[in-house]
Image (cartoon, rainbow, N blue to C red):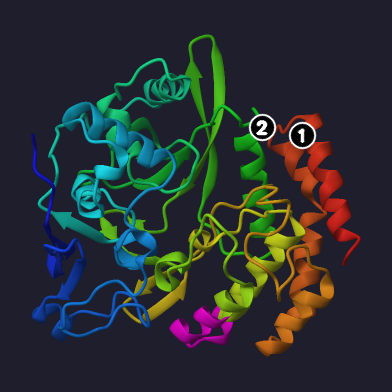
């Protein structure tokens, strides 16, 4: 039986960042490498001490793992695939798998810029990917008809977060060929995330999310490029939502940390307020324009009934000039938890205009009222954009009813 991992090297590209280790008492320690302290940057300001002292996590929330490294791990779908392979190969149940085992399994496939050595495995996979085969494999896994997991699906779909099935691939506008993205990709290709449907999702799920991304762009919310990727599955064709990854630029990787990772916020429960998000944006970026971006995203989530706005759906990207709020992601119609926003708005789960303006005043956002009106204008285009994306009339009207109810509060 393969032994559990008790020590990992953390890398950023080819540079060693530090070391993760498990003590005899089961504590997880992280220690920055001296060369990273002298030439690198703080991976998680206010969350991880930027010094050479071995340190435990600030909070035990992530099974003792430091928040910024927990961001490298998937949740939901990715954990399902990971748990199956550990159980099938080693006989380990979920509670026996340690966070370092999981990071070693992810290796170089983590979202963001960090990677981990030694890797649990270096399995050879095909560089050319067939999305129809992956989609079919997803349906097989979700049906529970097999405990085995197709290798290509496990590798392509094992790292992204979120509950819905998804895969990371490299796509090109000028080629029908889809690549794995885990090797150097050629000119003209970019890294994308393709989302499949879970058993509970409607057939309009991908088309609705594409419509939301279109509305967001009209509303001035910074979004990556999005598309509907059409895939043949036997006699039928499915349209899956695809979004270009903001943590990759051709063969360069960007370091990303989420609000959940920074604040040890449990993204499975309501635990933060948009005031926390705007405050974190102000502290990290020191840029009022970035704070306005966070306010605009908040307004969009509220006016579009996107109540699955948990702590892992907000992130920051490190660029050579400093930190920036990441582009928006996971924007779609959602009832959240108990039909309230997972992230509160000045203490409210279902706010009106007054709560948004309270936050605007608290952060001295003079354009607060103007931003709200710009978002309202974009949301008023729901039906037109939904028709363009072939959303069914039933789904279109059901969402429209909810959008009108929210609009009446503004």
Q: Earlier in the sequence, mark 1 or mark 2?
A: 2
Residue 215: which quarter of the image? bottom right
- Expressed as whole percent of the image width and height from the top left, the position of residue 236 reads 56, 14
Q: Is residue 167 visible?
A: no
Q: Is residue 228 left or right of residue 407?
A: left
Whole-percent x, y for residue 164 in the image: 50, 39
Is residue 108 shown to the viewer in this render? yes
Q: Which image quarter: residue 354?
A: bottom right
- In this rendering, the answer to whether 92 lies above or below 271 is above
Q: Nearer the viewer, residue 82 or 3?
A: 3
Residue under the point 36% across and 60% down: 62
Q: Quadrant of the C terminus?
A: bottom right
Tell me the SS state at disc 2: loop
Between residues 163 and 370, which one lies in front from this camera angle? Answer: 163
| Quadrant holding the N terminus | top left
As drawn, the label of residue 222 is: none
Residue 283 on the magenta span: yes
Magenta segment, prevailing SS (helix, strand or loop): helix
| Residue 368 locus on image (x, y percent) | 74, 80
**Closest to the observer: 314 or 286?**
314
Q: Is residue 221 highlighted in magenta? A: no
Q: Please tell me whether mark 1 sits on a helix, a strand or a loop.
A: helix
Q: Which residue is mark 2?
A: 204
Dot 1 corresponds to which residue?
Answer: 395
Among all residues in the image, which is located at the extreme right?
Answer: 408
What percent of the width, then of the height, locates residue 100?
A: 20, 54
Question: Badge 2: few (under 14), some or many (20 or more) residues near its Cα, within 10 Å?
Answer: many
Q: Which residues are magenta?
A: 279-290
Proximity of marks 1 and 2: CB atoms separated by less than 8 Å: yes
* Residue drawn 18% across the image and 49% down it: 104
């Amino acid at each position: 039986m393969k032994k559990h991992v008790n020590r990992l090297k953390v890398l950023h590209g080819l540079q060693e960042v530090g070391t993760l280790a498990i003590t005899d008492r089961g504590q997880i320690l992280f220690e920055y490498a001296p060369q990273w302290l002298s030439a690198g940057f703080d991976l998680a300001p206010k969350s991880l001490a930027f010094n050479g002292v071995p340190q435990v996590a600030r909070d035990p929330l992530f099974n003792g793992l430091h928040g910024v490294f927990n961001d490298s791990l998937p949740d939901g779908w990715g954990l399902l695939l990971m748990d199956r392979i550990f159980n099938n190969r080693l006989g380990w149940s979920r509670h026996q798998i340690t966070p370092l085992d999981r990071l070693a399994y992810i290796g170089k496939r983590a979202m963001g810029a960090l990677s981990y050595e030694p890797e649990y495995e270096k399995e050879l996979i095909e560089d050319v990917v067939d999305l129809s085969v992956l989609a079919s494999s997803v349906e097989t896994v979700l049906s529970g008809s097999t405990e085995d997991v197709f290798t290509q699906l496990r590798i392509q779909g094992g790292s992204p977060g979120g509950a819905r099935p998804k895969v990371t691939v490299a796509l090109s506008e000028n080629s029908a060929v889809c690549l794995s993205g885990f090797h150097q990709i050629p000119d003209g290709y970019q890294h994308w995330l393709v989302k499949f449907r879970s058993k509970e999702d409607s057939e309009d799920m991908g088309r609705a999310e594409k419509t939301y991304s279109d509305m967001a762009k009209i509303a001035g919310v910074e979004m990556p490029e999005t598309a509907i990727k059409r895939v043949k599955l036997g006699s039928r064709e499915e349209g899956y939502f695809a979004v270009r990854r903001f943590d990759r630029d051709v063969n360069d990787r960007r370091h990303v940390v989420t609000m959940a990772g920074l604040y040890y916020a449990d993204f499975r429960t309501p635990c933060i307020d948009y005031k926390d998000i705007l405050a974190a944006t102000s502290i990290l970026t020191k840029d009022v324009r970035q704070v306005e971006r966070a306010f605009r995203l908040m307004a969009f989530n509220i006016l579009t009934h996107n109540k699955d706005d948990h702590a892992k759906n907000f992130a920051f990207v490190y660029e050579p000039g400093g930190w920036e709020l990441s582009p928006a992601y996971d924007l779609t119609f959602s009832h959240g938890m108990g039909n309230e926003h997972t992230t509160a708005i000045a203490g409210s789960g279902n706010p009106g205009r007054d709560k948004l303006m309270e936050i605007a005043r608290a952060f001295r956002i003079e354009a607060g009222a103007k931003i709200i009106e710009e978002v309202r204008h974009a949301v008023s285009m729901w039906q037109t954009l939904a028709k363009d994306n072939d959303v069914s009339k039933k789904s279109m009207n059901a969402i429209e009813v909810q959008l009108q109810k929210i609009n009446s509060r503004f």
